[in-house]
Amino acid sequence: MKKPITLNDFTHKYADICVKSDTIPSHYFDEYDVNRGLRDKTGKGVLVGLTSISRVEGSKMIDGVKTPCEGNLWYRGYNISDLVKNLRGKRYGFEEIAYLLLFGELPTKETQTEFNEMLVAARSLPTNFTRDVIMKASTKDLMNSMTRSVLTLASYDDRASSLSLDNVIRQCMALISEFPMLAVYGYHAYNHYLNDQSLYIHRPKAELSTAENILQMLRPDQKYSELEAHVLDLALILHMEHGGGNNSTFTTRLVSSSGSDTYSVIAAALSSLKGPKHGGANIKVVDMMADIKDHVTDIKDDDAIADYLKKILNKEAFDHKGLIYGLGHAIYSLSDPRARIFRSFVEKLSVEKGLHDEYEFYTTVESKGRELITQNRKIYKGVCVNVDFFSGFVYNMLGIPKELFTPMFAVARIVGWSAHRIEELVNTDKIMRPAYQSIMQERNYMDYSARS
């Protein structure tokens, strides 16, 4: 009797058939002038829209020549360096910068107070939502958990599909307030049901900032230092928005253009962000650094670190992809302004945590890695350390588990997504319909009985 074929056997066989039938010869991309990944060979992106929300800069035109420059990032016309520099004293900035991105102007004390009160009012989940949705089917993949939760929240909204601007703003503000709970409670559910650890569900506190609430909801003792909260607040600000040309923000605008509801749009953005080529980059940095320490006996030995980095570049070590994660960026050339700002705060936190040797290890990998990439690769615009290089290290020092790294990115980026959704709805009612050039060859139909 013939053994029945399993679904796994079938799909394994037909995966090879798909490769054969779906592979497009590379010369077609040149022949039809198609930019892979929507970027040309110099890394310049295809222009698909206009935005006044933010801008990134990695080069300038000088005497008609594109010239690398120190990186800059602007939110609504304000340089990110100036925004961070002016958050003096004990003031947290996430809520203020969120207001700026959503509404286009820096808030007055009165409007900021009102905005904060509205965020606090929205900082709750429907009755039994944590038990009935987040706690059910808990998973290590917290981005999937958050996506499921966002889609389920639509069931509790009587105006889920309304595209009136005031309704979309209401929905976006609610999601901005709810995202920390969706992320942290999702982690606690996973840690309890899959890791057999104690379950803690701490409610957010009205008098605390977003960053403070994340730390007190996450930790069993609810305690944190002022520096810890300020560093997390800064991390959220730096990840909040990035020029509109990234994959998840484009997804936000693309799905918004179809007339879809806010919950579906943000679920799509989450699905984009969870990809390791986008929101998961800091996890790759942390994994790479752990791998280096496993193979280099003395992390203060610069030569040994450089030798191992050469193996990584030559695809002989770590994940064999030939990449030193956290170094290089699609736009920035000489420096990533987010990493530039982050660095001093990261060092302060490493001193408080007794991990300054670890910080110096990171800086050694950065300097040696940049040297090696410059020597061994054809780099047209320079190699800089990007914000992902430090963010995973920071999250580790804050006691944020690796499963929450990408969700923390989402907690910040929901603000940028919301701003772009609003801008898209205000400015156009046309659906985005990108063009694909077909290279299909017409064929004559073969009768079923004639196919062997």
Image: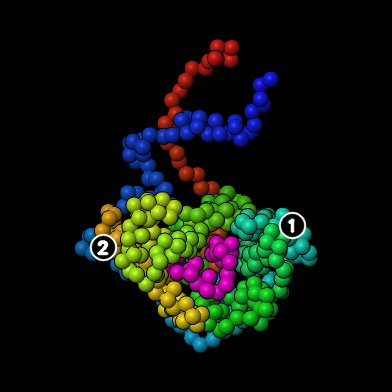
Taking the image as shown, residue 433 lies to the left or right of residue 448, namely: left
| Residue holding disc 1 | 136
**Which image quarter is the N terminus in?**
top right
| Magenta highlight range | 386-410
Residue 399, image quadrant? bottom right
**Which image quarter is the C terminus in?**
top right
> Which residue sits at x=51%, y=58%?
280
Badge 2: how crowded within 10 Å, few (<14), some, or many (20+)? Answer: few
Taking the image as shown, residue 68 lies to the left or right of residue 414, namely: left
Residue 126, image quadrant? bottom right
Measure the alpha-carbon separation of dots 2 and 1: 53 Å
Q: Is residue 174 above or below residue 213?
A: above
Image location (x, y in percent) of residue 213: 63, 76
> Which residue sits at x=39%, y=45%?
36
Disc 2 versus disc 1: nearer the observer = 1
| Magenta run includes residue 404 | yes
> Which residue sits at x=72%, y=60%?
193
Question: Are dots 2 and 1 in contact, CB under 8 Å?
Answer: no
Question: In this rendering, does residue 345 appear at all?
Answer: no
